[in-house]
Each structure stands twice: as structure tokens, then as C-alpha cells.
Amino acid sequence: MLFDVHAHYDDERFDEDRDILLSSMHAHNVGHIINIGCDIPSSEASIALAEKYPFVYAAVGFHPHEAANIKEGDYDIIAKMAQHNKVVAIGEIGLDYYYGKDTMDVQQKVFREQIELAKSVDLPFQVHNRDSTRDCLMILKEAKMGDRRGMMHCFSESKETAREMLNLGMKISIGGIVTFKNNVKTVEVVKYVPIEDIMIETDCPYLAPVPYRGKRNSSVYIHAVAEKIAELKGMDTEEVIYITEKNAKDFYDIKD
């Protein structure tokens, strides 16, 4: 079944129909979803969703936009959350210079600290990278993970960057942007990256794939991502679904 490794169902845009939508996932061949934390409240909300729905899992952590707001004791709270049996990752963590050029130094500090937190609780981590590839690579190289414990969420960089990420042991997650017209970079990345290193995501409610672009995104639409990857790699869609699901289960150590 389809495995959506990055979603935000705690977002207010799902307030009116969250339960109805999530209850319909199996009917849409969606077998697993990871709901992502961006701060303490959204991390708590992700755990609550994971407790309510057997097929939902949680990631906990601080988005780079929140780096300047972290207080003493906040990492202890995240570390405690990480002990929950439905928490499978730290994230989303990373760097974002598109909106955050004035907090670059603190973002880098928090990114390093959260990688170390992930190591200390023995969980993989999901990385957000926007307009910050050079520094993101530098910090990941310094971290010396070694055993493929990191994943690049919603990858939109070049094939050359993908090669460097793979060399560091990172996994690549592909979202709806691969279906966007004239998105040459992501098409090249999908063709280049071995299917065994690819996971799929929605980043919902953002980035709905074609032909749903402009709508509120949800895991109901993730099949379009799998279909596009299958087209680009000359594979059967069901094979792509099977392999990306296995990749995610193995990476996040999900046994069901």
C-alpha cells in the first residue's frame, strides 16, 4: 500500500473533515502516514493522531522556522516524546534561508543539536532544506551518520546534490512537485536515484500533485506521485508502491 512519509494533518485546513478524511485512507490504498512535528504543539498533535489511528505514526522536533523560539528544556520535552512507541523520527529539522536569512546561525546550531538528539534517542530524522543546500550538506557531512539515518524531505535540488546526499547515506523523499510541468531537476533526480533509496510523500496540505494542483493536498492524492515515478523509471506503478512502502517501513523500523 502507499506510504506517505510526510504529512501535516494537524494543520487547521483539516479541521472540518480530518476524521472523515483519515478514516477513508485504506479505501484509497494508503496504508501508512507519518505526521510531522514542527514545534512542541504540533509534535503533541502528531502523537495524538498516531494514538487515534493505527496506521498513523509521528515525527517530533523543531522546523527551522522555530529555531529562534526554542527555550531551555524544550529538547528534553522532545526527547521524552521520542520514547512514545508511535514516534518513528525526529523532524522536521534542517535549514530554511528563503524566509530565515536573519536566523541562519541559530538555524545551523539547532540543526546540529537535533541531529545529535536523533542519535541519542536512536531515531532517524527528516530534513527540510530550502535555499540552504551548501550549509545543509556541510552539517550533514560533519554529523557522520554512516548508516542511512537521514531523509531529505520533499527533495527539489539537482541530481548532483542528490548524488552527494546519497553518498552521505541519506534517503530521498519525492513529493508532488515531480508532477509539475517543466520541473526538470526533480525528473532528473528520480531517474538517477535508485528506487531503493526513494520514499514518497505529500507534505499535505501543501504541494498537491498534478492533476490536483491548487487544491488542498492529502494522502488521497499520493498515488499521482507513485504513478509519475513509475513513468519516469519505466516501472509498474504497483512495483513502485511496493518498493517505496518497504523502503519506508525499513527506514522507520515499522513492523506491521
Image (cartoon, rainbow, N blue to C red):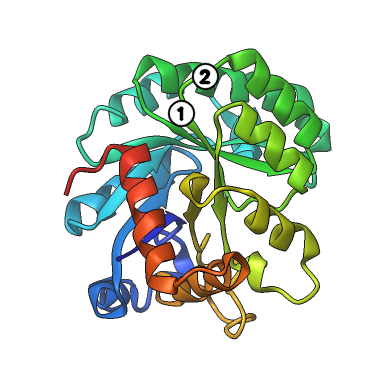
How many numbered discs, if any?
A: 2
Q: Residue furthest bottom?
A: 211
Residue at image position (39%, 36%) is 89
- In the image, is residue 88 above or below residue 55? above
Q: Nearer the viewer, residue 230 or 105?
A: 230
Q: Amino acid at mark 1?
A: Arg
User: Tag 2: Cα neighbours inside 10 Å, few (<14), some, or many (≥20)?
Assistant: some
Residue at disc 1, secondary structure: loop
Residue 7 in percent (x, y) is at 45, 58
Residue 130, by quadrant, is top right
Q: Amino acid at mark 2?
A: Met
Which residue has dot 2 on it? 145
Answer left or right for 104 relative to 237.
Answer: right
Which residue has dot 1 on it? 149
Residue 172, by quadrant, is top right
- In the image, is residue 64 above or below residue 242? above
Residue 74 in percent (x, y) is at 44, 24
Let me know if residue 202 appears in the view.
yes
Residue at image position (29%, 49%) is 57
Marks 1/2 in contact by CB < 8 Å: the verdict is yes
Residue at image position (52%, 23%) is 114
User: Tag 1: Cα neighbours inside 10 Å, few (<14), some, or many (≥20)?
Assistant: many
Let me know if residue 46 appears in the view.
no
Q: Residue furthest front?
A: 234
Residue at disc 2, secondary structure: loop
How far apart marks 1 and 2 lie (CA) works out to 6 Å
Q: Nearer the viewer, residue 157 or 62?
A: 157
Residue at image position (32%, 40%) is 250
Residue 39 in percent (x, y) is at 48, 39
Residue 60, by quadrant, is top left
Residue 36 in percent (x, y) is at 43, 48
